[in-house]
Image (cartoon, rainbow, N blue to C red):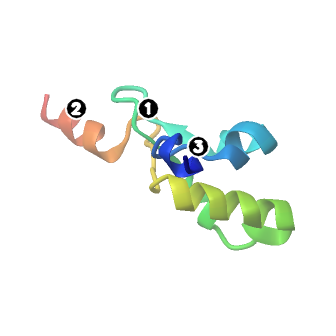
Amino acid sequence: MSHSKHTKRGYSIYIEKWNPSAKKYINTCVLCGCKGYSPALEQEGFCKSREQAVIFRELSRTLPRLELDERGCCADCARILEKV
């Protein structure tokens, strides 16, 4: 059986097993639990080393971009909080 049948969407062996320090670039919304990579990865000069380039490639491949506000909420949750 192929490996792809055993992996979940958003799971990366690189992040989970080989480089757990890359988890600090994963943002999680405090309200809904949505996960995505930090926009800090897209800033100019982040991919200076090979390790940082691999972190960016793996995170952008497995997770969507997720920007959080000062409360730690994603854009959807922040919009709902504004209405309440």
Task: Find disc 1 in the rendering and name its residue.
Answer: 71
Q: Marks 3 and 2: in contact by CB < 8 Å?
A: no
Q: Amino acid at mark 3?
A: Ile
Of badges 2 and 3, nearer the viewer stands: 3
Instruction: Please tell me which residue is depicted at 59% across the width and 43% down the height of the picture.
Output: 26
Residue highlighted by disc 3? 26
Disc 2, disc 1: CB below 8 Å? yes
Q: Earlier in the sequence, mark 2 or mark 1?
A: 1
Q: Indicate the position of residue 11 as horizontal and vertical percent values.
A: 55, 43
Front residue (pair 20, 24): 20
Which of marks 3 and 1 precedes in the sequence?
3
Label 2 environment density (alpha carbons within 10 Å; few <14, some 14–19, many ≥20): few
Quick one: 63 or 8, which is closer to the camera? 8
Residue 63 drawn at (x, y percent): 49, 52
Check residue 81 in the rendering and tell me which mark sits there, or answer none.
Answer: 2
Q: Give me the C-alpha separation between circle 2 and circle 1.
A: 11 Å
